[in-house]
Amino acid sequence: MIVLFNCTCAVPTTMDSFHPVPVKVNPDLQKERDAALFNPVELTYLKDGGKDKTERRRRCELLAINDPDLQHKDISFMARNERYSNAVRKAVIIARKIKEHRLTNMEEKQLYISAATQYDTYGFGLHYGMFLPALSAQCDEEQRNYWLPLAENLKILGTYAQTELGHGTFIRGLETTAIYDPKTEEFVLHTPTLSALKWWPGNMGKTATHAVVLAQLYTNGKSYGLHPFIVQLRSLENHQPLPGITLGDIGPKLGFHSFDNGFLGFDHVRIPRRNMLMKYSQVSPDGFYIKPIHAKLTYSTMVEARVTLVSDIAYSLSQAVTIAVRYSAVRRQTEQIKGVKEPQILDYRTQQLKLFPYLAAAYAFTFTSFVITGRYIEVQNEMNDGNMESLSELHALSAGLKAFTSYVGNEGIEVCRLSCGGHGYSQASGFPELYTLTAPISTFEGENTVMLLQTARYLMKCATTAKRGLELPRFVLYLSQRQKGQCPARNESDLLDHGLLSDAFEHRARRLVIEAAQKMQSNIGKGNPQHVAWNNCHMYLLKAASAHCHFYVVQTFVKYINDTEMSDAVRDILTSLCQFYALHGIWQNAGDFLQDGYMNGNQLDMVQSLVGKLLDKIRINAVALVDAFDFRDEILCSKLGKYDGNVYEAMYEWAKNSPLNKTEVHDSYNKYLRPLMQSSKAKL
Ligand SMILES: CCCCCCCC/C=C\CCCCCCCCCCC/C=C/C(=O)SCCNC(=O)CCNC(=O)[C@H](O)C(C)(C)COP(=O)(O)OP(=O)(O)OC[C@H]1O[C@@H](n2cnc3c(N)ncnc32)[C@H](O)[C@@H]1OP(=O)(O)O
Ligand SMILES: Cc1cc2nc3c(=O)[nH]c(=O)nc-3n(C[C@H](O)[C@H](O)[C@H](O)COP(=O)(O)OP(=O)(O)OC[C@H]3O[C@@H](n4cnc5c(N)ncnc54)[C@H](O)[C@@H]3O)c2cc1C
C-alpha cells in the first residue's frame, strides 16, 4: 500500500477513554484535543445520565461490535436484495444474542440494536418500533395476554399498516373498511379501490406475518371511524400471503434500502371479532359499539413514535457534526501565506458558521429529548389512571417538536455533508446513509407542515383560553402573561444573559401566536368559513408554531444548565453553546425580533458581533464537544469522522474494496470499449 499520510503522534489514554488506542493519530486532531478547555468524558457522563450509565452503554455497544456473527462487508457495496437479506439475518441474530446476553432492560436492548445495526435499518424495526407499541397501547387485558407473548417471542412478526396509496396525512379519509358481521362474529376487511391499498408500512413487503391495520369500522350499518385490527397476513408455515391478501414490496426509495416497505390489499378477508383491539372502544358480539373515553386514543402509537423521533434526530445530528468537525480539523485547504501550511478548514469563519449552529442544536435537541420523554412518561401514567386531560398537550408538544427538530436536523446533516466538500458526497463519509435514513423523519409519523399546523391549532385554542383569563398548562403558560415591552439589553454582556435570551424567544413566540390568532379572528370576521380562514392564515400559523417550539428548545437548554450539577469547565462551555444557539437563532430570524420593535438595529448589531465572538469560544472546544458524544468508529461508520483522524488512509483502503476494483480490467472493456476503440480507422 502507498502511504499517503503519515504521522507518529501517540494518543494519550486515560482511564475514561474507551477508544482503542490507534498506532498514530492525526496531529491536527491531537492538537485540538490537547487545547480543549474541558474534559469531554465529563460531558459524556452528563449526557448519558452518569458514569455508570456511560459504562453500561459502552459494554452493550462492545457486545455487538465485537461479535463475529454480526460482521459483514460494508453495506455501501451491497445490492438491495443483499441488504434486505443481511438486515433480516442480523435481526434474527440480534434477537438471539439479546437473550444470550440477558439484556432485559429496554434501554440496553436499544443500545445493543443500534450498535449491531450500525447505520443500517433494523430488520424488525416496525415490529418493535410500532407493532408492539400499538398492541401494548390498544389491546385490552385478555388480548394483551394472548398477543404480546407471541409478538415478544417473535412467534409472529408485525408491522403498522395505516397509510394508503391515496391517503397518508388525512387519516380520517382512509378507505380500508372493517365491516362487522354479527352472524359469524367476524369483521370483513376490504380494500375498495386502488387508492385504498395500504402503502409504505415498513417490513410489510416481505417480512411481516401480522399487521395492526387501521380501518374504518362499520357495525349495524353505521360508520364509527378509524379503528385498529390485528390481521394475519402470511402463513406461519410457509410465509405465503393468506387467501384474499395481496402483498408486495413498493420498490426502491431514496434510502431505507434494507427495508421492505410494502403494499397490502384485502379482498373481503374475515377476521374474528376479538381481532379488533379493544382497550378503548369495543364492538359486542351483537354489533353494539362502545366508544372510547377520548376520540383520538387510536392515534396514541403515533404520539409515542413522535416523542422517540426527537431523540433519534438529536442522535443523527450529533453523528453528522462529529464527522464534519473532526474532518474539518484534519482537512487543510488554500494557502494563505506563501510557503506556510494551508490552514485547517475549521479555522475558516464560514466553516464555523456552517457547523457550530448544528453542533449547538445537537446538544439543545438532546436535552429537549430528555424533557419530552419525561413528559411522555408522566402523561402515560396519568392516562393509565384514566385521566386524559394532558393528551392534547402531549400531542401538540410531540407533533411540533418532531417537526421542528427534524427540519433542523435534516438541514444540519446536509450542511455537514456540504462542509466536507467532495468527500462528503462519497459513501465513505457516512453522510449518504445518514441523510437518507433521517430525511423521511420530516415525512413519516406525520408530515412536518401538518404537524406544525396541529401544534398551531392547539396554540390558537390556548390563546383564546388566555384571553378569557382561564388557566393554561405549564408549557403554554407564557401565553397568558403580558408582553414585556422592549428588550432591555444595553450592551453585549446583557445579551449573554440566559434569562434575557429566553425572554426574547418567549416574547417572539407570544407575539406570533397572538398575531396568528388575531389574523384568524379577522378572517372569520370577514365571513370566511373556518377552513378557509385557516388556509388563509397558514403562514402565520406555521410561524407561530415554529416560534413556540424554538422557544421551548431555548428554554429547555437554559433550564438544563441551571438545574444540572456539572463542573465549572463543562458549565462554561455549555453556557457558551447555549448563548450561541439562542443568539444565532435571533440573528437568523432577525426580522421577527425587529418587526414589532422588541429589538432595535443596535441590539441586532450586538447580537451579530456576539455570534462572531462565540465562534472563537466554541472553536477551541469543537473537537472535544463532538468527542463527548462518544461515538465509536464502528457506530459512526465514516472514514471522514474517524476518532484517529487518519482520513486519507481510511478512504484509500475503503475504495480498494469497491466491487469495481475486483479485476484490473472490467468485463465491459471486452464487451463494449475494445470493439469501439478497435473499429476505428484511425491508427495510433
Ligand atoms: C429479543 C429482542 C428484543 C428487542 C427489543 C427491542 C426494543 C427496540 C425498540 C425499538 C427499536 C425501534 C427501531 C425503530 C426503527 C424504525 C424504523 C422506521 C420507522 C418508520 C415508521 C413510520 C411509520 C409511520 O409513518 S405510521 C403512519 C403515520 N401517520 C401519520 O402520522 C398521519 C398524520 N396524520 C394525523 O396524525 C392526523 O390525521 C391529523 C392529526 C393530521 C389530523 O387528524 P384528524 O383526526 O383529522 O384530526 P383534526 O380534525 O385535525 O383534529 C381533531 C382533534 O384531534 C386532535 N388530535 C389529532 N391528533 C391527535 C393525537 N394524536 N392525540 C391527541 N389529539 C389529537 C386535534 O388536536 C384536534 O383537537 P381539537 O381539540 O378538536 O382541536
Ligand atoms: C420511509 C417511510 C416509511 C414509512 N413507514 C410507514 C409505516 O410503517 N406505516 C405507515 O402506515 N405509513 C408509513 N409511512 C407513510 C407516512 O406516514 C406518510 O407518508 C406520512 O404520514 C405523510 O403522508 P402523505 O404521504 O399522505 O403526505 P401528504 O399529506 O400527501 O403530503 C404532501 C404535501 O401536502 C401537504 N399537506 C397535506 N395535508 C395538508 C394540510 N392539511 N394542510 C397543509 N398542507 C397539507 C404536506 O405539507 C406536503 O407538503 C412511511 C413513509 C416513509 C417515507
Image (cartoon, helix red, strand yellow):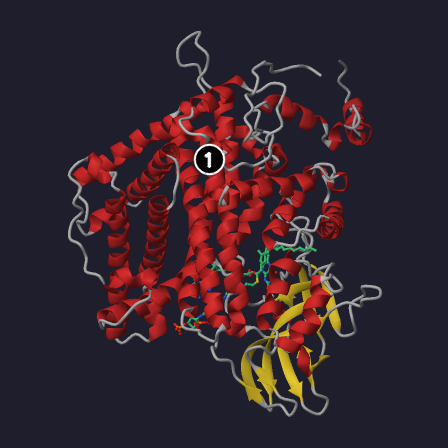
Q: Residue 446 appears at what percent x and percent y?
A: 50, 61
Specify the amino acid type for callout 1.
Glu
- The extreme top residue here reads 339
Q: Residue 170 appears at what percent x and percent y?
A: 50, 69
Res 230 quadrant in image? bottom right
Residue ID for mark 1: 42
Q: How many numbered marks, from 0 up?
A: 1
Of residues 403 and 535, the one drawn nearer to the viewer in this rendering: 403
Q: Residue at x 46, y 46 (%)?
A: 366
Of residues 559 and 605, the one drawn nearer to the viewer in this rendering: 559
Circle 1 residues within 10 Å: few <14, some 14–19, many ≥20: some
Quarter of the image with the N terminus is top right
Element under disc 1 = helix
State whether residue 148 is above or below residue 452. Answer: below
Quarter of the image with the C terminus is top right
- Decide if residue 331 is in sight here: no
- Locate residue 169 relative to residue 91 in the image: left or right: left
State whether residue 191 is above or below residue 515. Answer: below
- Locate residue 490 relative to residue 377 in the image: left or right: left
Q: Residue at x 32, y 70 (%)?
A: 461
- Locate residue 683 relative to residue 134 in the image: left or right: right
Q: Residue 458 appears at what percent x and percent y?
A: 36, 67
Q: Residue 677 appears at what percent x and percent y?
A: 77, 23
